[in-house]
Image (spheres, rainbow, N blue to C red):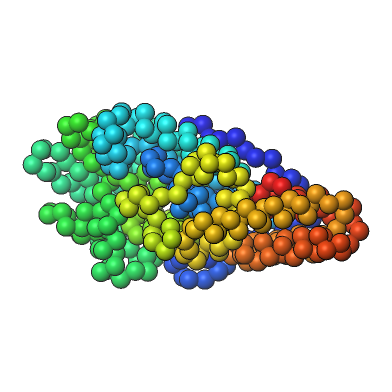
Amino acid sequence: MKSWSPPFVPTLPGTGRAPEVHDVLDDTVRPVTPVDGRVSLYVCGVTPYDTTHMGHAATYVTFDLLHRAALDAGLPVDYVQNVTDVDDPLLERAARDGIDWRDLAVDQTALFHEDMTALRVIPPKAYVGVVEAMPTIVAVVERLVDAGVTYGLTDDSGATDSYLDLEAVGGTEGVSVLDEATMLEYSAERGGDPDRPGKRGRLDPMLWRGHRDGEPSWESERLGPGRPGWHIECTAIAMEHLGDTISVQGGGSDLVFPHHPMTAVQAVAATGRSPFAAHTTHQAMVGLDGEKMSKSKGNLVRVSDLRREGVDPAAIRLVLLAHHYRTEWSWTDDALTEGRERLARWRAATALPAGPDAAETLAAVRAALAADLGTPAALAAVDAWCAAAEAGEGSDAVAPGLVRDTVDALLGVAL
């Protein structure tokens, strides 16, 4: 699947420090671990409907910052993102709206590309749809079948679904720190089926959904016709493009269970190599006026809607950067006003013929991002330089250009 066009990224003097980010499994902030000399980054992509709301935008901007910080530190990055272009929510939305699910996926994926381009997100090297990856996914499921760690359940229609037997592969130890009651709660809320009769373990993830009338399906001699479960797609795509072990598995905090743990446990079961990811890192939830923003509630603020209203995408990005990625926050009109005002101040200050020396500002932004993507501190450093420049301090003619390049290269904001 074709990705979006990359933004221009200015070259900065010197190099930054290798970034440190939080890991949810050991609750520590530690350096990102390159694998074979490269930072391998897998970020779970969208199910293409109702894109791109601010929860999506916050996630992809956060991992764009990690991407930029790693590149600035001289670390090559292999970034992979999937598109869940066939799944129950997509099929349900297409049926509700009376359109073909494939058309919905194509239209919404294109809109997502436009939003990512507008937000100056560096695209992944591999941008992979589930439909195009079906042979890869089938091969991984069949590998698990061969390992003897799966079982089938047949429903009244005669369709047989394949599940991973978690007990046979050691359960969720090492991939989740949640207690069983919380895992069961999240599984029921987030696409699992813990109460299905006949399952060996209530948390066992579905690997392959046997064909039902009216649903799309793909052929497999071993599994029968059907389509993949949600988690196995990311397992297969990540391993195919990044290898058995990766540096960072990322996404929104709603993936804390079951998606990220199941992605990891399936990979370990298929390869025998542990851990699957050296870091599992999550973007906190974004709300709207104090309530959780979600597709199910319908209280979404979309990037495309704001763009149509004439909002500069750079201002949207500054709203996102004003909050640390691990802190939950709510989108408000006041926050957007603050983002617009900050953008105007930065543009005015960097348009001046001279200003204070900007080397310390560059160093401060680099240090803030290296320390667990500390965007509020990074923005404060730029704010301070702009205030000094507007006060007439300094006579360095190259400083405004260096600040512009710093903001563009590291924060992804074009002034």
* Residue 316 falls left or right of residue 103: right
Residue 383 can be seen in this image: yes
Total marks shown come to: 0
The residue lying at 74 percent from left, 45 percent from top is 10
Residue nearer the viewer, 379 or 175: 379
* Residue 252 position within the rendered picture, expressed as x and y whole percent measured from the top left: 44, 56
| The image quarter in which residue 264 lies | bottom left
Query: Which residue is painted at 59% across and 61% down in the image?
Result: 322
The quarter of the picture where residue 319 lies is bottom right
Q: Residue 223: horizontal and vertical position, in percent?
A: 23, 37
**Residue 123 visible in the snapshot:** no
Q: Is residue 135 left or right of residue 45?
A: left
Residue depicted at 27% across the width and 57% down the height:
189
The residue at the point 52 percent across, 44 percent down is 306
Tell me where residue 110 appears, x and y as whole percent. Answer: 47, 33
Picture coordinates of residue 120 (x, y %)? 61, 44
**Residue positioned most to the left:** 156
Q: Residue furthest right?
A: 395
Q: Left or right: 65 with respect to 149?
A: right
